[in-house]
Structures are given as structure tokens and as C-alpha cells.
Image (cartoon, rainbow, N blue to C red):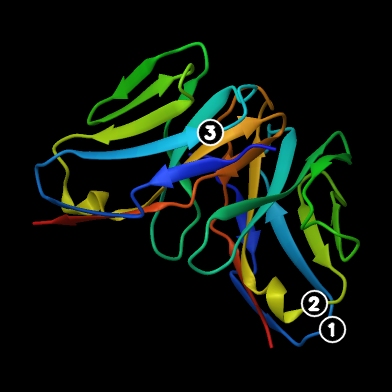
Amino acid sequence: EPEVTQTPSHQVTQMGQEVILRCVPISNHLYFYWYRQILGQKVEFLVSFYNNEISEKSEIFDDQFSVERPDGSNFTLKIRSTKLEDSAMYFCASSEDANAGGYTFGSGTRLTVV
Amino acid sequence: GENVEQHPSTLSVQEGDSAVIKCTYSDSASNYFPWYKQELGKGPQLIIDIRSNVGEKKDQRIAVTLNKTAKHFSLHITETQPEDSAVYFCAARLSDKLIFGTGTRLQVFP
């Protein structure tokens, strides 16, 4: 069964450093998403991306965050200057059609900011 | 914006019993309601979903019901097994994003 692949599985970084989280969505999917989950809390929407641009973003997705699809397969989330409160699991998801439902999530990257 | 509430936060059942998890949503424009199972250290996995033009959907031991008027939707698991133990999240889709509930930790005791 097709999967969304995320790397790395765990990233430890110092406060103020930049991090890039990587995702390879399912190949025929056109809609891409980043969500995050702070330990023990619910999954929160960060951003959606379609046709090489952001289609929607949440209040969490401030100027420190950016997304990019640098080539035909990767989808990245960059945090420019990490803060302690950025520590969370970050999940990438993709879907074939925004109206079809059926978002497939990756297994996540655990980001720890120290 | 959309707000999704989920109850209960924890649920313990004996193997073979049924489990019911309930969610409510606030925005009547939400049109798609998936349920996800999350095991420790893994990403959410879609287990069943329902669209706003359908009242009920069943897939083997799992069923979901939707009451659009009341803005309620529920997950029903029958004949629970220990491997059903996980955290379950409901979600509602509004425009291009999923709004998740706060999760239910289900424990099935053998």
C-alpha cells in the first residue's frame, strides 16, 4: 500500500537553529499538508499546499515556518529559528483530491528543541 | 472556525464488548468526517470515514454514524479485541483542513 514517508524520524536541535523536515507524499497525490502534535495533545493543522503554493495556513504557521516542494517528489517544512515550544511530532499528509477525503499521514518526525 | 469536541477522553472495555466514541462539531459547512487510530509512536491511520450526505457507514466491526442536524458523529467498535487498544481521533474537514478532536484512549482488556 502506498505510504507517505517522513525523514528524519527524530531530530534534536538547539534553540534558534533552523530545521528542515522532509516528506515524500504518495506519488499521484496533489494536495499536501503539515500537521503537528504536541505530546499528549490533539493533532493540529499547520498548512495545506496545492499547485506549488500555500492554499491555507493556521495561526501557528507564522513567519518562522515555510514549506516548499523543491522537486517532483519532496515536500519540506522549514522552521527558521526554532523555539522550545516547537517541540512536537510533525506529520506530513497527502491526498489525491481535496474533496475526496482519505488523507494519508506519514509516521511523523519527532522534533526536540533543547 | 470549526471546533471538534470528543468524548470520552479514556475508555476501558472488556474484550468482546462494544466501544462508542462521540464527537460534535460546530461548523455546519464541514462535509467530511474521518476517524483515525493512532498507535504509540506512529502517525494517525484512517480507519473509517463518512461524508455529510450519508447517515451511517459500516466496515466489518467498525461503524460510524452522522447526525447532521445535531452536528454529532460517533464511532462504534463491536467485538473489541486487545489490538484495538490505541488513541482514536475524530476529525471534521472544513475547506482544505482537518480539525481534530482531542482523542480517546481506548484500552481493551483481555
| Tag shown at residue B67 | none
- Location of the C terminus of chain A (image quadrant): bottom right
The amino acid sitting under disc 3 is Tyr
Chain bearing tag 3 is: B
How far apart are the two marked residues, 3 and 1, measured between alpha carbons? 37 Å
| Looking at the image, residue B46 lies above or below residue A38 | above
Q: Position of residue A45 (x, y in %)?
A: 67, 49
| Looking at the image, residue A80 lies above or below residue A73 | below
Q: Secondary structure at mark 1?
A: loop
How far apart are the two marked residues, 2 and 1, measured between alpha carbons? 5 Å
| Tag shown at residue A16 | 1
The quadrant where residue A52 appears: top right
The quadrant where residue B21 appears: top left
The number of callouts visible is 3
Q: Position of residue B84 (x, y in %)?
A: 25, 49
Q: Position of residue A17 (x, y in %)?
A: 83, 82
Residue, x 27% and y 33% (percent of image)?
B76
Task: Please report contact status of discs 3 and 1: CB closer than 8 Å, yes or no.
Answer: no
Q: Is residue A67 visible?
A: yes
How far apart are the two marked residues, 2 and 3, measured between alpha carbons? 33 Å
Q: Secondary structure at mark 2?
A: loop
Say which residue label 2 marks.
Answer: A82
Q: Horizontally, is A85 left or right of A51 in the view?
A: left
Q: Horizontally, is A83 left or right of A70 in the view?
A: left
The amino acid sitting under disc 1 is Gly
The amino acid sitting under disc 2 is Thr
Residue, x 52% and y 69% (percent of image)?
A39
Task: Please report contact status of discs 2 and 1: CB closer than 8 Å, yes or no.
Answer: yes
Q: Secondary structure at mark 3?
A: strand
Nearer the observer: mark 2 or 3; the answer is: 3
Say which residue label 3 marks.
Answer: B25
Q: Position of residue A84 (x, y in %)?
A: 71, 81
